[in-house]
Image (cartoon, rainbow, N blue to C red):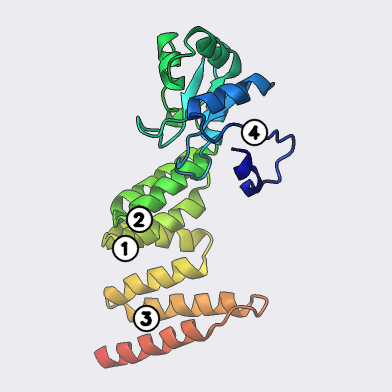
Amino acid sequence: PESDVHRLNTDMPNLICEPVSPFSSPDQRVDTILERCEDEYVAIVPNDFPIQEFWIECALHALIHSSPDYPGFELKESTDRLWGAVVRRNVLQSARKTYPHLSIRDSLRASGVTLRQPEFKELPFQFDNLIQEVKSEEQNGNWSEAARMYERIGELYHNTLWMTRLAAKAFFKAGEYTRAAKLTRNINQQQPHVDTLLLEAKIKRQEKDFNSAIKLLKTAEHILSCSDGSVDCSFVSAQTSAFKRIREGYS
């Protein structure tokens, strides 16, 4: 409705606002805009549709990279109640011209067009999507699965060192200390990092190998002391002192 146009806050260029009757149906509003549309692709988004990261980009990317005769894709989170999609303009125009009395979705179906959501291999930002999946596993407490996913991502994208660090942390959270110890040891032998040194020190403490734990903490403290001074070394120093007291208690 024209009264709602002022509520639209966007910096996107070439935005065309087309006033419609406040009593018009969603399908009628799409038909009104479709008459003005000049681009090859049309996104259909109902009111109250959940907006997520890449919510339109995923379907649009899949359609752009599909065969020229592929009609379109449903948006992620699209349901029977809240149905959204990105379709080719000529496909939608043909369906609306032939079946104007039906809803947008039903007119496409009547034209023989059935849409689906993109498969994972069709999505953009696949690395980002994989990381989001892993973070979801972590939030659900599935640390073992998250760790194995990090390892697979490392193999797939050849960022092994980074993903191995994350996998080691996840294995530790999962209670798989042997696996976590192996990964952190390999990392610290290649390219020691403060967080993996601290993690290996925790594992050594659990094994009551306090001398090795203290050595690892001192290495972490040295790395921090060689930094630009913006990092506080007091935590590592406190950990080293604590491990020394524990070692003395066992000696």
Q: Quadrant of residue 63?
A: top right
Task: Give the camera-side residue of 86 and 248.
Answer: 86
Looking at the picture, which amino acid does disc 2 mark?
Answer: Glu
Looking at the picture, which amino acid does disc 1 mark?
Answer: Lys
Q: Position of residue 200 (x, y in %)?
A: 39, 69
Crowding near pointer 4: few (<14 within 10 Å), some, many (20+)? some
Assess whether mark 4 and mark 3 are in contact (beta carbons under 8 angstroms).
no
Kindly state the secondary structure of the residue where label 4 is placed: loop
**Foreground mark, 3 or 1?**
1
Report the Cα–Cα distance between label 2 and label 3. Answer: 32 Å
Q: Which mark is residue 98?
A: none
Assess whether mark 1 and mark 3 are in contact (beta carbons under 8 angstroms).
no
Report the Cα–Cα distance between label 1 and label 4. Answer: 55 Å
Report the Cα–Cα distance between label 1 and label 2. Answer: 9 Å
**Foreground mark, 1 or 4?**
4
Report the Cα–Cα distance between label 2 and label 4. Answer: 46 Å
Crowding near pointer 3: few (<14 within 10 Å), some, many (20+)? some
* Residue where numbered disc 1 is placed: 173
In the figure, is residue 206 to the left or right of 98? Answer: left
| Marked residue nearer the N-terminal end (1 or 4) | 4
* Residue where numbered disc 4 is placed: 19
* Residue where numbered disc 3 is placed: 211
The quadrant the N terminus occupies is top right
Specify whether residue 49 is in view. Answer: yes
Q: Which mark is residue 138?
A: 2
Looking at the picture, which amino acid does disc 3 mark?
Answer: Asn
| Marked residue nearer the N-terminal end (2 or 4) | 4
Looking at the picture, which amino acid does disc 4 mark?
Answer: Pro
